[in-house]
Amino acid sequence: MGWRLLIGIALTLLRARLRQSIVAAASVMFGIAMFITLTGFMSGLNGLLDGLILDRTPHIRLYNEIKPIAVQPAQLADSSGHVFVGSIKPKEGLERIRNASAIMDALGNDARVEGVAPRVVAQVFFNVGTTELPGVVNGVDPLEEARLFRFKDYLVQGELRGMLQANSIVLGKTLAEKMLVDVGDVVQLTTARGERFLLKVVGLYQSGIADYDKVQCYASMQNTQKILGEPSNYITDIAVKLKDLDEAPEVAEEYRGTFGLDALDIRTANAQFETGTTVRNIISYATSIVLLVVAGFGIYNILNMMIYEKLDSIAILKATGFSGGDVRIIFIGLSLIIGISGGAVGLAAGLGLSVAIHHVPFTTQALPAVKTFPVDFSAHRYVIGIVFALITTYVAGFFPARKASRVDPVQIIRGK
């Protein structure tokens, strides 16, 4: 029989059980809408939480780590006698990266690299009366940090250009509150060598992690090198941002061998955050899929009841020339009509709920860059939702349709 005739019969059967069909379509709609809303909101939340670390973390960090000598003096001595070794000290040397300029030029010419930012790290103590608070001053290039690692998004007070001034510093917000200082005040710090400096506070930085903001501070590379008493070519870290984050482990291993430096990739440094993201995604997808499966059982039950109620109609169809395949197509088509209509409305409802959530104000001091609830509007989850809805409704309609195709019209009519 023609497809148009078969679909017309399916629509007639659907109208005959319109209330139950609407309930089945509503269950599919609810499942799709919750799938879109839950997964979008969870993905947005994952992006927000991971961004607290990943946005500020270089994809690859090149540095020199202080390590003990692999072969100690005692191991070189003759084991036949007694060896007395005391007061072993590491060889005096700088933590600097040698030939940093040449290394950064080589990194800049690598097609896989989006940007390179040099850094100088200094351990200091802030003098607050007779109390000394530990801190870490990160000497950075403010413009490159803002371009590559969104530094400006977390600068809650002050201007980025203020860091270019001589003897200036940006304090972590939590540290500034402990010291009772604000933008425009002057703070005093002591280096590991015992030298003291007076620096003007030109900004406050808030990452959203209190323990981080309690010790981390930022200054220009020139100011940090001056604090350490080092020349302008003194660099302790090179932060590399790649065009493809997934390449970080392999590229880090390559740089480790090429430049003879320690290389820490972002995957290794933040493995726990990726684990948390994966678990949260599994939970949200599992919950949404359960909703769609429950909707599939509802369609299955409705079609089963429809078959029992429409045995006479099925028998007449088969007696007038409709084959078992035609009957199967009619009931599978009926199921797919329910799935397509419910799925389409569910996509619209899911998008509407996502937009509504995204416009709900969400302000917290811990996340200064966030103004509303985070929602991910990626198109792939809409495709997944409608495809899964069609699969669910097809499977739910397949078994009742197969049962209807096997109805013997002679027995039905004889029974009547």
Image (cartoon, helix red, strand yellow):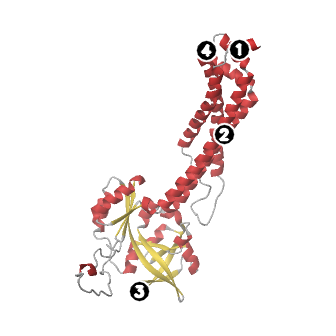
Mark 2 vs mark 1, CA separation in Å: 34 Å
Mark 3 or mark 2: name the one nearer the start of the chain: 3
Is any atom of residue 351 visible in this view?
A: no
Q: Position of residue 273 (x, y in %)?
A: 51, 59
Q: Nearer the viewer, residue 45 or 293?
A: 293
Is any atom of residue 185 visible in this view?
A: yes
Quadrant placement of the N terminus: top right
Mark 4 or mark 3: name the one nearer the start of the chain: 3
Decide: few, some or many residues near mark 1? Use Cα within 10 Å; few <14, some 14-19, many ≥20. few
Give the residue number, with chain letter if any, for mark 4. Answer: 323
Amino acid identity at mark 4: Ser
Give the residue number, with chain letter if any, for mark 1. Answer: 411
Give the residue number, with chain letter if any, for mark 3. Answer: 195
Mark 3 vs mark 2, CA separation in Å: 70 Å
Mark 2 or mark 4: name the one nearer the start of the chain: 2
Q: Nearer the viewer, residue 191 or 267?
A: 267
Do residues under tags 2 and 4 come within 8 Å of each other at their CB atoms? no
